[in-house]
Amino acid sequence: MNHPLDAAFRAAVARLRPAGMPPLSTGEPIRPGSALTGQTALALFDAQATSRQLDFLARQLQAEGRGFYTIGSAGHESNAAVASALRPTDPALLHYRSGAFYQVRGTQVAGATPVRDVLQGLLAAADEPIAGGRHKVFGNAELSVIPQTSTIASHLPRAVGLAVALHRAGKLGVLTPWPDDAVVVCSFGDASVNHSTAAGAINTALHTVYQHLPVPVLFVCEDNGWGISVRTPPGWIERAYGAQPGLRYSQADGFDLPGVYDAALAAAQHVRETRRPAFLHLRTVRFLGHAGSDAEIAYRTPSEIEADYARDPMLGTATALVSAGVVGSAEVLERYDAAAAEVERTAADLSDPPRLDSAAAVMAPLAPHRPDAVAASVAAAGRTVKPDEHEPLTLAGSINAALADALSADSRVLVFGEDVGRKGGVYGVTRGLARRFGAGRVFDTLLDEQSILGLALGAGLAGLLPVPEIQYLAYLHNAEDQLRGEAATLRFFSQGAYRNPMVIRIAGLGYQRGFGGHFHNDNAVGVLRDIPGLVVACPARGADAAAMLRTCIAAAAVDGTVSVVLEPIALYHARDLHQPGDSGWLDGYVPPEQWEQAHVPIGRARTYGEGADITLVSFGNGVPMSLRVARRLSARGIAARVLDLRWLAPLPVDDMLRAAAATGRVLVVDETRRSGGVSEAVLTALLDAQFTGTMGRVTSADSFVPLGPAAFHVLLGEDEIEAAAVRLVEGDSR
């Protein structure tokens, strides 16, 4: 490789000389007091050299138009010692500069092919063993490496969640893929420490251990001093995390391989034995810029870049080996060249790799959907639940009963979130569940939505079935990437080797009276509908809520599905439909033996009435509003039927088409915003299916929801629905 870094390394190694001490055997410590032997140091050098050669080749492949990823690990190769200090059964969530770690982990498992794995990722090869050509990630289920994308620190909440969940699963008797004394390791860069996901995740770990609960997580901060072109202030990482109560902090210089190995070994031992978190601050250097497209010379001087060559961790390893007399400088270079030759041979074998050749191939692992198996799971769960006695239930009461049934039927189910435990939720939806099922199954979390979802992500990985609650839809938005970038992508980037099943309950939508304003009346659902593979349920009444929640939990268990159940706050305690005291919005409890008959598959709507003049398509609060409007239309001689979508993703397109064809006229009643709401998708689906009837829509305004009575100036009202329906019918009749 003709690169200044390569030339500098070769020249520096050629100048190395033994320290004059008697040569060490490979089985002896490489220096007094260190646990690192010469034999292990040689193996780590080989892994470092392999990782370095892969980085060089990545640039070459890109230049040839064959490679598609150039964020490398050059300068971070001291993380090889971290891998060596851990076990191959310790789950690892790795920074994108953890190439040497991955090479070492690959040598710890018989039959692994880590060089080939990385090259297949660089080439976007369809037979790459973890992501299958969908992204270049470090991941392999056989190596306990959980693939992560390159979003900043977004994997830390999951790592903490997994560490917490391992202990909880053990207490509940749920088998996990990892040993009881496993350590969860996650690596990240110094710039990532400043991201809210990192700060929140580390805070969550400390908050948890403060309560004397196990959190066996090892945070590894690989500090190269840069966030692309922005410097990290010297000393900042140590200042921020060097004296955090409950967090064991240690640091090591990446140039000093024995020091890194000993520090990593001690940190891992601390976590394994105490089940408390540790923070390993690994000082590194970054070579080859942030990525192939990064013109480092634009913000660093040539002399500054060259000065870093003296801090090369591979040179540090070579220096330690030669000084101790384990090998000479010539053998170091021979091993370095042997690594290059292995990389080149493997690349030659992959000269014409298979590529993903269709949209279907790309999307295959995205969100598997086996409705028959889900239905069978719902029916089977009913056979394990003892029937309860219930009066007719509201929406909130039905959700509570369905959660109790799920907790009774499956010991893997957890219900958690802010206020869901002792209080039973802001609206009483989870009232009594913690007392009935215990704090191990139903519990309160700290107030951080990223960490709530991170706990769910980790719990799903650990073999549990988490049902987290986000208190309000508006509170989701600061944590939405935990859904988009983490939950929804895991199957996609692991071809189903890993999954994080979960059912997220979110209280939302508008029309709440007495406790309003934007943050408690948020109707921004577009952010959910835009996530590939995410199932979005929106029940309007109790019977549907219970059935749909059972479906989502079964889909999580069977297919690893990630679902959101959007619960309309204003309907939680609604009892009446048309007039006070009519109890028209209460539903009887469906006993377990009838769950099979009451099953609601994903993507199936509900129809009210058989009106032949117009179909009102709606969801959530819009359903009872539309039913009331339908009665008013009937008094005007217009026969309307109401279609409750129930599922906002995927939309029930077949049911929509049947209902539309039955009347020839469709009015979409959409309580969300006119731009980016649900109605756009409904009308588009009808057009795509070549529906030729009359269509229209009424929506709420493109506005945030204000406090008090002003809210009803921007939220859709029943008078608007009625007027639009009349116009549609009468205009079509003329």
Image (tube, grey):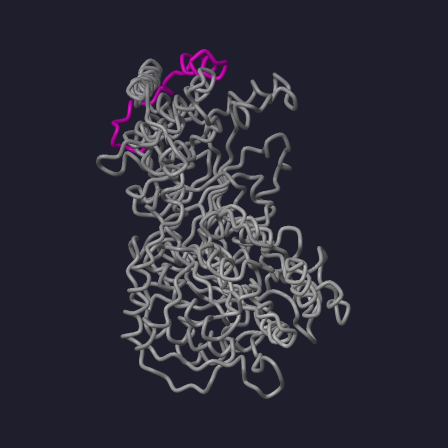
> Residue 63, can we see it?
yes
58 relative position to 170: left or right: right
Residue 454 % position (x, y): 48, 55
Q: Residue at x 30, y 23 (%)?
A: 326
Q: Is residue 5 magenta?
A: yes
Quarter of image, res 237: top right
Q: How many callouts does the rendering have?
A: 0
Q: Is residue 475 magenta?
A: no
**What secondary structure prevails in the magenta region?**
loop
Please determine whether, in this image, residue 424 is positioned above or below residue 191.
below
**Position of residue 151 in the picture relative to residue 461 (left or right):** right
- Between 634 and 459, the one lying in front of the other is 634
Residue 205 visible to the viewer: no
* Picture quarter with the N terminus: top left
Q: Quadrant of residue 442?
A: bottom left
Q: Position of residue 194 (x, y in %)?
A: 60, 45
Q: Residue at x 59, y 69 (%)?
A: 621
Looking at the rendering, the stretch of residues picked out in magenta corresponds to 1-29
Q: Residue furthest left?
A: 110
In terms of image quadrants, where is residue 73?
top left
- Which x, y percent locates residue 252? 47, 38
